[in-house]
Image (tube, grey):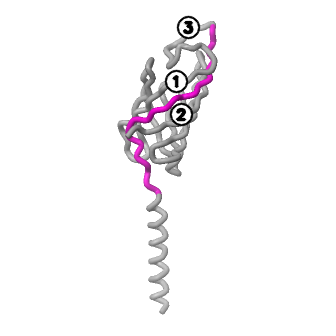
């Protein structure tokens, strides 16, 4: 009886452990994601400005943006971010909860949350000596 109890307990531990890991699949982010980024920005007007995704020196603007993730290994990924005026590289990781997504580009940080397999909420923050930008948008994967 004691051996049977130990066997059943061990079996339950294995089943519960495997069930816990079954839900931990890292999402596949590869593909083309599009959005209208709602931006507020300001620039230092007394300095020559480097390239920007928009022509506006300050204020509220909307920017159509595409993020293409073309390589992913587990929780790590890379690709590019582009607008009509500029393209730059992105690199990122998926958080431990498999919902948070963190990306960096040439000079900014993007914080995302997966809300569906093909949809992410996105906040972008950018601070350089030349300009500061805060933006948000909904990324939708093109199928």
Quote the CA–CA distance across marks 3 and 1. Answer: 22 Å
Residue that badge 2 annotates: 110
Give the mark, 1 or 2, whose residue is nearer the N terminus: 1
Q: Nearer the viewer, residue 30 or 115?
A: 115
Residue at (42% x, 23% y) in the render:
87
Discs 3/1, front: 1
Residue 135 lies left or right of residue 65; in this view the side is right
Residue that badge 1 annotates: 63
Q: Quick check: 70 above or below 82?
A: below
Is the residue under label 2 in contact with that under label 1 (CB below 8 Å)?
no
Give the mark, 3 or 1, whose residue is nearer the N terminus: 3
Give the percent coordinates (x, y) of residue 99: 52, 48
Residue at (54% x, 43% y) in the render:
113
Give the percent coordinates (x, y) of residue 114: 51, 45
Q: Element under label 2?
A: strand
- The stretch of residues the image draws in magenta is 24-45
Q: Residue furthest bottom?
A: 1
Give the percent coordinates (x, y) of residue 1: 48, 92
Q: Quadrant of residue 118?
A: top left
Give the mark, 2 or 3, whose residue is nearer the N terminus: 3
Quote the CA–CA distance across marks 2 and 3. Answer: 25 Å
Structural crowding at the residue carrying mark 1, measured as other residues with C-alpha within 10 Å and reported as few (<14), some (14–19) or many (≥20): some
Q: Nearer the viewer, residue 4 or 115?
A: 115
Residue 41 colored in magenta in the image: yes
Structural crowding at the residue carrying mark 3, measured as other residues with C-alpha within 10 Å and reported as few (<14), some (14–19) or many (≥20): few
Residue that badge 3 annotates: 48
Structural crowding at the residue carrying mark 2, measured as other residues with C-alpha within 10 Å and reported as few (<14), some (14–19) or many (≥20): some
Residue at (63% x, 18% y) in the render:
59
Is the residue under label 3 in contact with that under label 2 (CB below 8 Å)?
no
Discs 1/2, front: 1
Q: Quadrant of the C terminus?
A: top left
Q: Element under label 1?
A: strand
């Amino acid at each position: 009886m004691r051996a049977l109890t130990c066997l059943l307990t061990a079996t339950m531990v294995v089943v519960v452990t495997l069930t816990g890991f079954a839900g931990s699949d890292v999402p596949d982010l590869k593909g083309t994601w599009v959005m209208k980024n709602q931006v507020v920005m300001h620039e230092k007007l007394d300095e020559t400005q480097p390239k920007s995704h928009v022509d506006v020196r300050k204020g509220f603007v909307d920017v159509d943006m595409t993020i293409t993730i073309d390589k992913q290994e587990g929780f790590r990924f890379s690709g590019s971010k582009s607008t009509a005026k500029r393209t730059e590289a992105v690199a990122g990781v998926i958080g431990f909860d498999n919902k948070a997504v963190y990306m960096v580009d040439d000079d900014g940080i993007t914080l995302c949350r997966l809300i569906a397999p093909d949809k992410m909420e996105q906040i972008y923050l950018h601070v350089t000596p030349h300009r500061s930008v805060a933006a948000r948008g909904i990324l939708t994967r093109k199928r």
